[in-house]
Image (cartoon, rainbow, N blue to C red):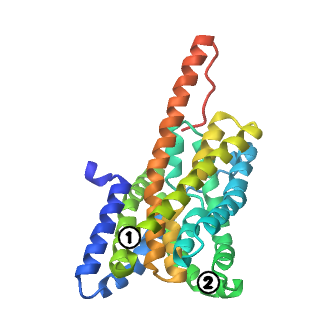
Amino acid sequence: MRVLSPSPPWLFLLAIAVGLLLGLTGSDAAWAEHATDPLIMLLLGLVFLELRVGGARELLRSRRAAVVALVLNMLVLPAAALGLVTLLVPDSEAVRLGLLIYLLFPCTDWFLGFTRVAGGNAVLGAALIPVSLVLQLLLYPVWISLVTGRSLPGVMEALWPAVTEGLLIPAAAAVLVRLLVGRAAGRDALAAVQRAGGAALPWVIAALILVLFAAGASEAVLAPWVFVQVLIVVALFFALSMGLAVAVSRRAALAEPDLILVIFTTAARNAPLMLAVTALVLGEDPVVTAVIVLGMLLEFPHLAAVSWWMRRRRRRDRRRSRRLGVAEPLTAAS
């Protein structure tokens, strides 16, 4: 049913509008504050439930593409994001922090769907997800310390309760569900539960956006010039990530499916997880939340456009191969 498969950008825009309306017209936002932590826990639990594990063999088989994706995502693009934000957003600490939290960390979920549709190496993409997630959680306090000026021990002290309460509990619950369902009902049932969790994810993200905006409605409306700043920085980052992904992949002589994977894993950002982790570690800042959500809204049309371009490119190459009588190379999409 269409109602159960919403278009995430429209769903998130609706959540923002309803949250702002409730926050600006209601007298008491305590309900929203009370709902925030449970929704964060549910969001993280669904992320861990859907997380694909394993794939060490694929990482070894496609290690060159894996290294390219990880180096770009964990070193090159974070440095580029830091430079862009420092140069273009010199005044507002909250806007700068929101942009950096959005841009610094690569996606661990929906990029895989775009990769598969475009004919990329989805098997390697799935194998990269747990590696990327662990690296992000390890690097998170380092980046937060760097961009906020807080001491690393202080950030770690604030992060530890969030990790133990906000991450380990949802992770343990997800592992328990996977074990119980997998052993009691088999792989097919577990896959069905994971698909249901993935389908619920946009709704839970929307609910979290709604309560965060309702709780901080008076501060969450971005000024027009801030909206333009965010739009410019995110657009430049997407263009830069695309250019670097193509250039480095060509330099490394990656196969076409691996190139497509690198393009999508560098384009998509990990907004849902970082939205939740940041709310746990730094508290609910409505401006930071608004910037992260705006980046997420801009990301979907970008990914859709890249996916359309890659499919069009594949069709063109396929026609050219037929004309030349050359066999079409196999892709790793599955």
List x then y, in percent, for residue 220: 39, 76
- The secondary structure type at the circle numbered 2 is helix
Q: Quadrant of the C terminus?
A: top right
With respect to residue 131, does 20 lie above or below?
Answer: below
- The secondary structure type at the circle numbered 1 is helix
**Residue that mark 2 sits on:** 160
With respect to residue 150, does 56 lie above or below?
Answer: above
List x then y, in percent, for residue 32: 33, 81
Could you say which quadrant of the image residue 28 lies in? bottom left
Contact? badges 1 and 2 (CB < 8 Å): no
Q: Say few, some or many: other residues with alpha carbon within 10 Å of mark 2 (under 14 / 14 to 19 / 20 or more).
A: some
What's the mark number on residue 221?
Answer: none
Left or right: residue 152 versus residue 129 is right
Q: Please tell me which residue is depicted at 29% across the width and 54% down the height of the picture.
A: 4
**Residue that mark 1 sits on:** 209
Q: CA distance from mark 1 to mark 2?
A: 24 Å
List x then y, in percent, for residue 58: 68, 45
The one nearer the camera, 7 or 330, is 7
List x then y, in percent, for residue 33: 37, 84
Left or right: residue 15 versus residue 325 is left
The one nearer the camera, 49 or 229, is 229
Specify the amino acid type for callout 2. Answer: Trp
Specify the amino acid type for callout 1. Answer: Ile
Left or right: residue 100 versus residue 19 is right
The one nearer the camera, 20 or 57, is 20
